[in-house]
Amino acid sequence: VGAAARGAVWGASTGAVVGAMQGSRVDQQRAAQQEQQQIAQLRAEIGNDAYAGRESLVDCKHDVALGYSRQATKARNRDHALAGLWLEALSYADRGDRQQANALLPRIAKAAPNISDSKQAGTVLDETEGSLGDIRVHYGLAKQCPRGR
């Protein structure tokens, strides 16, 4: 009777664990689908070049990100071109070249309908730079890039 009872308890607990694992997989699949949808939406909003540059920037490949940003700024779509300007400024700021980043703020303020001046563009740039660190941490990377990359 003891063995039968232990077997029943083992079976029930195993079933619960397997059920929880399957539920967890379903949750993970849903989360992955949502992330893919968000990526597709972001890619549509900022364009392929700016998106690829963003990925490079997350990986601390500043020169690659700058190359993509320059391509994006040539886009016919104004939103994609603006995303390229932001990416360029963020790339410079992230690698520690604040002077180059600040030099782009007047162009950003002129091109961005929701930015009134260079000061506001600088504030948004600072906030975005903080978010970039959070994105890196989310993917298991260092929050800040090593200098000189």
Image: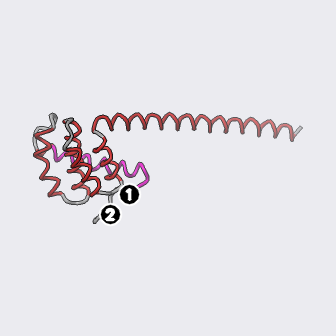
* Residue 54 forms part of the magenta stretch: no
Check contact, mark 2 vs mark 1: CB within 8 A: yes
Horizontal side, residue 143 vs residue 16: left or right? left
In the rendered view of the protein, which quadrant contains the C terminus?
Answer: bottom left
Horizontal side, residue 51 vs residue 5: left or right? left
The vertical placement of 63 against 52, above or below, is: below
Three-letter amino acid code of the residue under disc 1: Ala
Residues packed near mark 1 inside 10 Å, few (<14), some (14 to 19) or many (20 plus): some
Q: Element under label 1? A: loop
Residue at numbered disc 1: 142
Label disc, if present, on residue 64 of the rendered structure = none
- The residue lying at 15 percent from left, 56 percent from top is 100
Q: Element under label 2? A: loop
- The residue lying at 37 percent from left, 51 percent from top is 136
- The residue lying at 28 percent from left, 44 percent from top is 49
Q: Residue 74, image x and y in percent?
A: 19, 43
Q: Residue 126, image x and y in percent?
A: 22, 49
* Magenta portion: prevailing SS class: helix
Three-letter amino acid code of the residue under disc 2: Pro
Residue at numbered disc 2: 146
Residue sitting nearer the eye, 127 or 52: 52
Q: Which residues are magenta?
A: 121-143
Q: Residue 7, image x and y in percent?
A: 82, 39
Q: Residue 138, image x and y in percent?
A: 41, 48
Residue sitting nearer the eye, 131 or 110: 110
Which image quadrant for residue 79?
top left
View extreme (bottom): residue: 148
* Residue 134 forms part of the magenta stretch: yes
Question: What whole-number distance in Å separates the C-alpha atoms at marks 2 and 1?
Answer: 9 Å
Residues packed near mark 2 inside 10 Å, few (<14), some (14 to 19) or many (20 plus): few
Looking at the rendered structure, the number of numbered marks drawn on it comes to 2
